[in-house]
């Protein structure tokens, strides 16, 4: 009976919690059909004239899913050539039909691997980057045009309004692509030299920036004015932390086709709703030392391995680097971020293990690719060693193993940063509209900073913590009705450290609760829980932690902080240690149960619970709610919110159902699937187990993120991989 129950649970989770996404690592099949017989010539003409026009494909089929009347054009700079049989592609699925998409994405950008014999550089660097900063998702695709296989591509998520909403919770902010547009403006500096330069005449910016939003040149100009002339105010106009993460990552991985090089280009700049610009990494096919412009000519392998960690700090052509590195504190923060990436990805060789896994995934496609740019031998060897004319394309491990040794020998990395421990709050669970004392023990520190906020889209407010003696630091902050998100940064004269180390991307949380709380929310209920009328509507769950019944007559529930009395509770009571469900579906009093007059937005929303006196009792801010997944307090009624399988009208403490959607790139994935030989498992943490269809355990191992399993001798059939409270069904052929 236990085995049967276990099996049913695995099947339920496998089929309800995980669906394949176009950017899940694997190889998609993309079929493009043009009615135009001379489609290649037409695309070449469109590219040469740079008119922005697309050739309409009758249909694009992605893993069997059909989109019709799709706009296609060539893209790229050095990777494009009219003589190429395989050019990079930009596919706009909603070019004709508004809303047409694949897995909610309406633009796919396909790169041809021109700079990369390994064909893994772009995927690998995007995967690592997403651990620390906003970065595109990426996978592989075999592309067929009019029935003929054109070759293997990397398929990369576009930086567009969907991307900015996912990472910045804002769709309409100013967005610029930074590249040499070719626009020549009289009386303005030529080329890329003025990329960070401030111009009183913003027309001059058009030669180095491509605006992809509304008429926002003035906003960009004001930003550059601050960078150049009012740098002490930089945190008002720049997300400094995201910038430092990008700079440290790019330098560490010698990804010079971007903002840290003297010829800064090939990235995006986006302005969030806090008025701050952020650089967004892009075009990573030239990562790991394959772009050497502005270095010594010719740059040797040793030059790449020993690239100055503060590259660009003395070159006035790169004003961003010179200004950022002029601050001692920013330099220490930058090094702290680089140290984190170094420790988590490179010292432990995770990057090289992952490189080999990616290589195995695409091996057969590389072998058969009719239009590849490099030999199969180069594909196999370039992970480890240099290939090409005069060994001009450095091997990935050849570069990074030596670079790790070099960086570890630098004074900045030999220096001892402070240690952070024993972070506590008093009270442990502060009540709304009160004060809370946050304390921490730190050794070897001269300055300690607490960064905190109450909403995902807010900038962290930074305050200096007080040294109260004995290595103890403390600060008091006032809280509203929302939970607190916070991190700690400590430094001495030599080094700095964050807690958590991936701050500000990751953070500690502190629940702000009273006895009556918003306990669970579902804002994308497609099939999880039906209301009394059989409709799948959004819902909010309240929990009464009091030992007495509470009448809610005169209380309010709202999704608008400027209209807190939006919906009024009727004369209804919630019993002690019990739950109450409110459906957010506009039905009002026309259906059984409690129904509001408004719906919730899965993109971004807040829910407010208000007392009869107008006081906000509880408030919850959420973003990017996954379909059929709840957002719930764990522990029940008192904890911070996590994404998990719904626990409708019940205790939330079903920890086995918790899903880490904050780091959704760590979703448990298995490739190839089905398989008859070896499987590669991504996102596994801690104990990894595999069970057969009868519930028998056939494999168990302690792992960290990535591993491989030889299944060649297993019986064919269905198996279930389980790790980190996630389950994936696999098929052994």
Image: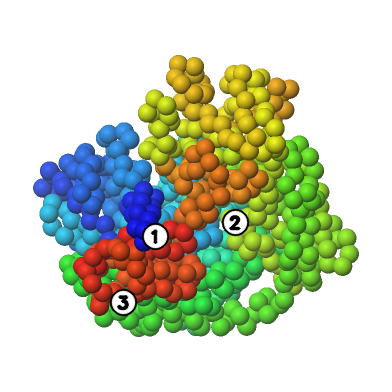
Q: Residues within 10 Å of mark 2 (few under 14, many from 20)?
A: some
Residue 395 vertical placement versus 268 (above, below): below
Whole-percent x and y of residue 478? Answer: 78, 42
Disc 2 secondary structure class: loop
The residue at the far right in this view is 469
Whole-percent x and y of residue 36? Answer: 13, 44
Asked if residue 361 shows in the view, the reply is yes
Whole-percent x and y of residue 409? Answer: 62, 83
Apparent side of residue 318 relative to residue 290 in the rendered image (left or right): right
Residue identified by numbered label 1: 2
Residue identified by numbered label 2: 506
Picture disc at residue 490: none
Apparent side of residue 208 relative to residue 418 in the rendered image (left or right): left
> Which residue is depicted at the point 74% across and 54% down?
450
Q: Residues within 10 Å of mark 1 (few under 14, many from 20)?
A: few
Picture disc at residue 710: 3
Q: Earlier in the sequence, mark 2 or mark 3?
A: 2
> Which residue is depicted at the point 16% across and 60% down?
149
Apparent side of residue 155 relative to residue 525 in the rendered image (left or right): left
Q: CA distance from mark 2 to mark 3?
A: 34 Å
Apparent side of residue 275 relative to residue 602 in the rendered image (left or right): right
Of the two numbered discs 2 and 1 in the rendering, the one whose residue sits closer to the viewer: 1
Q: Earlier in the sequence, mark 3 or mark 1?
A: 1
Q: Residues within 10 Å of mark 3 (few under 14, many from 20)?
A: few
Image quadrant where one finds the N terminus? bottom left
Residue 415 vertical placement versus 199 (above, below): below
Residue 666 vertical placement versus 188 (above, below): below
């Amino acid at each position: 009976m236990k085995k049967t129950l276990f099996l049913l649970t695995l099947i339920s989770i496998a089929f309800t919690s995980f669906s394949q996404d176009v950017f899940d690592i694997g190889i998609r099949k993309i079929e493009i059909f043009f009615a135009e017989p001379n489609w290649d010539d037409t695309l070449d003409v469109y590219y040469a004239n740079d008119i922005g026009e697309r050739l309409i494909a009758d249909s694009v089929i992605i893993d069997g899913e059909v989109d019709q009347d799709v706009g296609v054009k060539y893209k790229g700079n050095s990777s494009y050539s009219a003589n190429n049989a395989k050019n990079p592609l930009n596919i706009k699925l909603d070019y004709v039909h508004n809303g047409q998409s694949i897995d909610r994405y309406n633009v796919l950008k396909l790169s041809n691997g021109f700079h990369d014999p390994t064909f893994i550089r772009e995927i690998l660097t995007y995967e690592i980057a997403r651990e620390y900063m906003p970065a595109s998702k990426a996978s592989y695709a075999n592309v067929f045009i009019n029935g003929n296989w054109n070759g293997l591509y990397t398929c990369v998520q576009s930086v567009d309004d969907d991307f900015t909403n996912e990472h910045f919770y804002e769709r309409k902010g100013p967005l610029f692509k930074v590249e040499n547009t070719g626009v020549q403006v009289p009386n303005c500096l030529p080329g890329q030299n003025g990329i960070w330069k401030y111009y009183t005449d913003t027309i001059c910016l058009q030669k180095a920036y491509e605006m992809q939003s509304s008429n926002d040149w003035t906003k960009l100009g004001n930003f550059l004015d601050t960078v150049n002339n009012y740098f002490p105010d930089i945190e008002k106009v720049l997300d400094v932390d995201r910038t430092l993460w990008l700079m440290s990552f790019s330098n560490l991985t010698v990804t010079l086709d971007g903002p840290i090089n003297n010829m800064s280009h090939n990235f995006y700049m986006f302005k969030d709703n806090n008025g701050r610009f952020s650089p967004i990494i892009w075009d990573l096919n030239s990562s790991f030392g394959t772009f050497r412009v502005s270095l010594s000519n010719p740059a040797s392998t040793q030059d790449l391995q020993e690239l100055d960690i503060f590259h660009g700090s003395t070159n006035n052509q790169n004003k961003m680097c010179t200004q950022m590195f002029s601050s001692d504190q920013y330099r220490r923060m930058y090094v702290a971020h680089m140290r984190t990436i170094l420790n988590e990805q490179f010292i432990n060789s995770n990057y090289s293990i992952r490189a080999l896994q990616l290589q195995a995934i695409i091996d057969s496609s590389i072998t058969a690719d009719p239009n590849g740019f490099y030999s199969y031998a180069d594909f196999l060897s370039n992970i480890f060693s240099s290939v090409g004319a005069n060994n001009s394309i450095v091997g990935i491990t050849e570069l990074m193993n030596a670079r790790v040794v070099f960086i570890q020998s630098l004074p900045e990395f030999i220096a001892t940063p402070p240690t952070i421990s024993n972070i506590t709050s008093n009270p442990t669970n502060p009540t709304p509209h009160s004060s809370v004392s946050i304390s921490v023990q730190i050794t070897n520190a001269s300055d300690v900073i607490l960064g905190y906020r109450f909403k995902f889209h807010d900038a962290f407010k930074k305050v200096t913590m007080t040294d109260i003696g004995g290595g103890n630091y403390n600060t008091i902050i006032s809280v509203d009705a929302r939970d607190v998100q916070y991190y700690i940064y400590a430094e001495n004269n030599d080094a700095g450290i964050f807690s958590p180390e991936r701050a500000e991307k990751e953070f500690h949380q502190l629940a702000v609760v009273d006895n009556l709380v918003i306990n669970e929310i579902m804002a994308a209920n497609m099939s999880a829980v039906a209301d009394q009328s059989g409709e799948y509507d959004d819902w909010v769950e309240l929990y009464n932690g009091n030992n007495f019944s509470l009448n809610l007559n005169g209380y309010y529930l709202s999704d608008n902080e400027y209209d807190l009395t939006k919906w009024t509770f009727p004369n209804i009571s919630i019993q002690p240690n019990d739950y109450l469900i409110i459906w957010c579906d506009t039905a009002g009093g026309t259906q059984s149960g409690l129904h509001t007059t408004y719906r919730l937005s899965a993109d971004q929303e807040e829910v407010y619970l208000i007392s009869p006196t107008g006081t906000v009792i509880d408030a919850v801010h959420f973003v990017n709610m996954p379909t059929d997944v709840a957002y719930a307090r764990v522990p029940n009624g008192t904890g911070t919110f996590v994404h998990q399988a719904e626990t409708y009208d019940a205790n939330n403490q079903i920890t086995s159902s918790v899903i880490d959607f904050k780091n959704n790139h760590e979703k448990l994935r298995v490739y190839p699937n089905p398989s008859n030989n070896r499987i590669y498992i991504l996102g596994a943490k801690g104990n990894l187990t595999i069970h057969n269809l009868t519930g028998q355990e056939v494999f168990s191992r302690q792992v960290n993120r990535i591993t491989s399993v030889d299944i060649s001798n297993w019986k064919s059939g269905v198996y279930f991989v389980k790790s980190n409270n996630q389950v994936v069904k696999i098929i052994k052929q």
